[in-house]
C-alpha cells in the first residue's frame, strides 16, 4: 500500500468512528474519545471549509454525544440517517423492524453474551462478549429476516445488523459529495471494518483515497496500523494546515462534480515514519495517483441481501 500524505486543504474527509477515530471497547457504550480529538476535528473542519463528515453505523445522536459540542455533517446507521453540511436531516423511510425485533428478542435473551440493539433505522445483534456465537447469530438473524423485502443483513466487527437495503457508507459518501462544501473536492475515506469497503470503493470511484485502519485485503489504497496512528495523522495534518505548511501544491483533481481545478496531479514523494505513516506534506492526490494497493475486489463487502 502507498504511504499516507498529510491532508490537503482541497480534500474532503470522511471518517468512520469505532475502530477508526476511537479504539474499540468490549461494549459499544464503553468507547472513549481521546482528549484533543474533538479540537483536531474542529480545526480540520475549519481548514477544509466544512468538508469533514462522520460516516458510521451508530446513530447521529450517539455520534453527537461522543463528539460534543462538535456537530459535523454525519451519515449515521450506515447512511440511513444523514445530516448535511447545513445541518439538514435527510432520512430514508423508517423500515418496519418490530416483527424482526420480536423474533430475535428470545434468542438474544437466551445467550447472555449477546446484546440486541434497536436503532430507529436498524437492528443490531452484538456478539463481542461471545465471539463463539458468530455463526449462530448470523444464522438466527438470516432466519428471522427470512424474505422480508427492503431490508438486508450487514456483517460488521462482532455485530450483525439489519438495515434498509441499498443504503451503505458508499451511498452516503456519494450523496454528501454532491453538495457544497464537499462537491469538487478529492475525498478521503478512513475506516476499519468490512462495512467501510463500500466507502473505500466509492472514494476510489470519485478519484479519492481509502485509508484502512488495520490490515487485511481491502479496496483502500493506504493503511495505518491502528486508530492511534490515524489520530496522529489527523493531529499532524491539522497542525500543518494551521501553520500553512499544507496546501502549497496544486489542488487535486475531483471526479465528483462541481468546480474543476484543472491542475496537474502532484508528484511529490513521501517517506515512512516509524508509526508507518508519512511525515511529509505531499497532498493525498499523490497517493491516489499511485497503484491501487492490494488489488482486492472493491465490491468484496460482506453485505448480503
Ligand atoms: Mg469502524
Image (cartoon, helix red, strand yellow):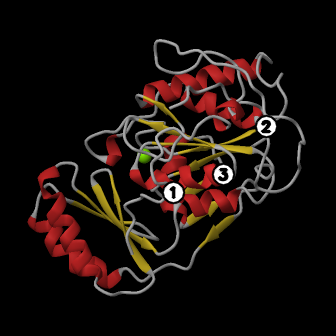
**Mark in front: 1 vs 3:** 1
Q: Which residue is mark 2?
A: 252
Tell me which corner region of the image, top left, top right, bottom left or bottom right, holds residue 143. bottom left
**Along the viewing direction, whichever of 47 and 7 lies nearer the viewer:** 7
What quarter of the picture does the C terminus occupy?
bottom left
The answer to the question of whether label 1 and label 2 lie on touching residues, with beta carbons closer than 8 A, is no
Q: Nearer the viewer, mark 2 or mark 3?
A: 2
Quick check: can you spot residue 214?
Answer: yes
Spatial CA span between label 2 and label 3: 22 Å
Q: Secondary structure at mark 3?
A: loop
Q: With respect to residue 231, does 112 lie above or below?
A: below
**Element type where label 2 sits in the image:** loop
Return the x and y of residue 218 as percentages of the image width and height.
44, 45
Dot 2 alpha-carbon crowd within 10 angstroms: few under 14, some 14 to 19, many 20 or more: many
**Which residue in the protein does label 3 denote?**
73
> Relative to 95, is 138 on the left or the right?
left
The answer to whether 27 appears left or right of 134 in the picture is right
On the image, the x and y values in percent for residue 158 come to 27, 52
Q: Contact (CB < 8 A) between labels 2 and 3?
A: no
Name the residue tied to disc 1: 198
**Could you tell which of marks 1 and 2 lies nearer the N-terminus?**
1
Image quadrant assignment for residue 285: top right
At x 34%, y 39%, the residue is 24
The 10 Å Cα crowd at callout 1, few under 14, some 14 to 19, many 20 or more, is many
Q: Earlier in the sequence, mark 2 or mark 3?
A: 3
Q: Residue at x 55, y 80 (%)?
A: 93
Mark 2 residue CB less than 8 A from any atom of ligand 1: no
- Please tell me which of labels 1 and 3 falls first in the chain: 3
Residue closer to the observer: 86 or 183: 183
Amino acid at each position: 500500500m502507498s504511504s499516507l500524505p498529510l491532508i490537503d486543504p482541497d480534500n474532503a474527509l470522511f471518517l468512520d468512528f469505532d475502530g477508526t477515530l476511537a479504539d474499540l471497547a468490549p461494549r459499544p457504550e464503553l468507547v472513549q474519545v481521546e482528549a484533543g480529538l474533538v479540537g483536531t476535528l474542529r480545526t480540520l473542519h475549519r481548514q477544509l471549509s466544512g468538508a469533514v463528515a462522520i460516516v458510521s453505523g451508530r446513530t447521529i445522536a450517539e455520534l453527537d454525544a461522543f463528539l460534543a459540542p462538535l456537530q459535523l455533517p454525519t451519515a449515521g446507521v450506515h447512511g440511513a440517517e444523514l445530516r448535511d453540511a447545513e445541518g439538514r436531516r435527510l432520512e430514508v423511510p423508517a423500515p418496519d423492524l418490530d416483527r424482526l425485533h420480536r423474533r430475535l428478542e428470545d434468542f438474544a435473551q437466551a445467550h447472555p453474551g449477546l446484546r440486541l440493539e434497536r436503532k430507529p433505522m436498524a437492528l443490531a445483534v452484538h456478539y463481542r462478549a461471545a465471539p463463539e456465537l458468530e455463526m449462530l447469530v448470523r444464522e438466527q438473524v438470516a432466519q428471522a429476516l427470512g424474505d422480508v423485502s427492503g431490508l438486508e443483513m450487514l456483517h460488521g466487527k462482532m455485530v450483525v445488523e439489519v438495515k434498509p437495503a441499498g443504503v451503505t457508507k458508499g451511498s452516503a459518501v456519494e450523496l454528501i459529495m454532491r453538495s457544497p462544501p464537499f462537491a469538487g473536492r478529492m475525498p478521503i475515506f478512513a475506516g476499519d471494518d468490512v462495512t467501510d469497503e463500500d466507502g473505500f470503493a466509492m472514494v476510489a470511484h470519485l478519484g479519492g483515497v481509502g485509508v484502512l485502519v488495520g490490515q487485511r485485503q481491502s479496496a483502500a489504497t493506504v493503511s495505518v496500523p491502528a486508530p492511534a496512528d490515524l489520530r496522529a495523522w489527523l493531529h499532524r495534518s491539522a497542525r500543518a494546515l494551521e501553520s500553512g505548511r499544507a496546501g502549497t501544491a496544486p489542488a487535486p483533481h475531483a471526479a465528483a462534480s462541481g468546480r474543476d481545478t484543472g491542475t496537474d496531479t502532484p508528484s511529490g514523494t513521501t517517506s515512512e515514519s516509524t508509526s508507518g505513516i508519512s511525515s511529509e506534506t505531499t497532498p493525498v492526490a499523490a497517493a491516489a495517483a499511485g497503484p491501487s494497493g492490494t488489488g482486492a475486489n472493491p465490491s468484496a463487502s460482506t453485505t448480503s441481501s
